[in-house]
Image (cartoon, rainbow, N blue to C red):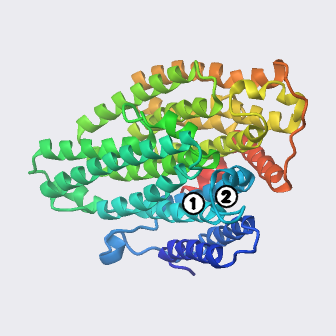
Amino acid sequence: MIDAPLLEIAVVSLGIVILMVEAFAEKIDKRSLAIAAMVGLGLVLLGTFFLSPPPPAEATGFWSFYTADPPAIFFKRFALVTTILVLILMVDYAPIVRQSIHGATHQSGLGEFFALPIFSCAGLMWMASAIDFVMIFVSLEVVTMSFYVLVAFTRRNPASLEAGVKYLILSALSTGFLVYGITWIFGVTGETNLGRIAGVLRGGGIEEGPVLFGMALVLVALGFKIAAVPFQIWVPDVYQGAPTPVTAYLSVGSKAAGFVVLLRVLEPFFMLPQIQRLLVGIAVLTLIYGNLAALPQNNLKRLLAYSSIAHAGYLLIGVVCLAGTAVSFYLVSYLLMTMLSFAVLVVVAARTGDRIEDFNGLAKRSPFLSFAMLIAMASLAGIPFTAGFLGKFFIFDAAIRQHQVTLIAVGVITVACGFYYYLKVVRAMYWEDSASNETIPLSMLTRTTMITLIAGILVLGVYPQPILNALR
């Protein structure tokens, strides 16, 4: 049996080993480092199935900061799978990185490009287990600092540099809000542990005003991480300018970790009715803005950026209803369909571009890639018999049980918007004529990954039980 904290130690050690090998083994093919990283993360993923039982919830010392409950283990696996998929995308993206890095060899920079997601993964895993504001802050910064570098990694690209600067400035600002909010909460309750804060709030006798102010500041910081309105202003430019695999990682990994933390942080504060009303307002604004802003987009990365904001709105419906299982299933379905869409985008954009018109006639040039993108777009839109449909179904079911009429009405209307802008991509692939008849080659690794993602979307669309059982 393995103690849960050893998982993060193993991931950090793997990242350090990859960096050391990259620094001193100059003659190897740097893409082999990505393969080694995938194998290492796969072994850590296997280790999550052989964990020792966690200590009681009232444990002190290290275990007052860290938990290994079922949701934490589930999201550790989520972070590991996401990182493995991102590394696969990075292997396909390696030629573009080579063109954007000045170095002594044609492979300069690739080792760091493959190592940084490993450190982000460690931070995401810590966030999944964090039950103390101190641990939440530290793990959040581990993730964010890795993303600072990754977003601006292709530094010869002005759009990437602009994205990196925007992400750095706004992320630093959100961190300030988080620390200030934690300070207010600690000042009133005298605690940073979420369980003990809940006990203080239940005991009464404290001023609600400072607690609400502190929690509002924390929500500003977490709203930045999950791309909720009105804290989403960074998303379109950063998603478009960042390297495509990094965009996928931001869209899935960072968002999932933000929602895990949000669910844990809100649990002790949800007894305050003002918090629920505030979240309902944020969810409505996020749904409306994300979906309406996606309608006129012609760049696929930018469309997926606004789509990411819209999906944050649907996830916030589950958060308002404290439906952890529904949120978790939605995140799994979002992982599958977003990674599939970005996998296709990486391959196609390397040949033509990332505008929707660059996908014109893709069904004739590459039937498999067009079919993969069709499945991804159908699931993102929420068409039945896909994982995306069941994800939305569970979210709306939770809202109906909680009688959240406003959220249901806005959610159903905005789903219709999604059909329009997602099916624009399908129309381009199957109905528009292509200016080129060049076929697009695929590596065996990429093709196998896409087939696995397609199978996951279709299987979970009719049989969600494996994920639901894993959450119990």
Q: Are marks 1 and 2 in contact (CB under 8 Å)?
A: yes
Camera-nearest residue between 300 and 100: 100
> Residue 117: which numbered mark, if any?
1
Q: Is residue 369 above or below residue 191?
A: above
Quadrant of image for the N terminus: bottom right
Q: Residue at x 54, y 36 (%)?
A: 308
Q: Residue at x 77, y 28 (%)?
A: 359
What is the x, y in percent for residue 69?
46, 64
Q: Earlier in the sequence, mark 1 or mark 2?
A: 2
Camera-nearest residue between 445 and 204: 445
What is the x, y in percent for residue 424?
70, 21
Q: Is the residue marked by circle 2 packed among few (<14), some (14-19), or many (20+) residues within 10 Å?
A: many
The reply to whether residue 403 is visible in this rendering is: no
The residues bearing labels 1 and 2 have C-alpha atoms spaced at a distance of: 8 Å
What is the x, y in percent for residue 391?
59, 38
Per the image, label 2 sits on a secondary structure element best described as helix
Q: Residue at x 59, y 64 (%)?
A: 112
Residue 130 image-quadrant placement: bottom left
Q: Amino acid at mark 2?
A: Leu
Q: Is residue 370 above or below residue 150?
A: above
Q: Amino acid at mark 1?
A: Pro
- Which residue is tagged 2? 87
Camera-nearest residue between 128 and 179: 179
Q: Is residue 2 left or right of residue 316?
A: right
Camera-nearest residue between 200 and 35: 35
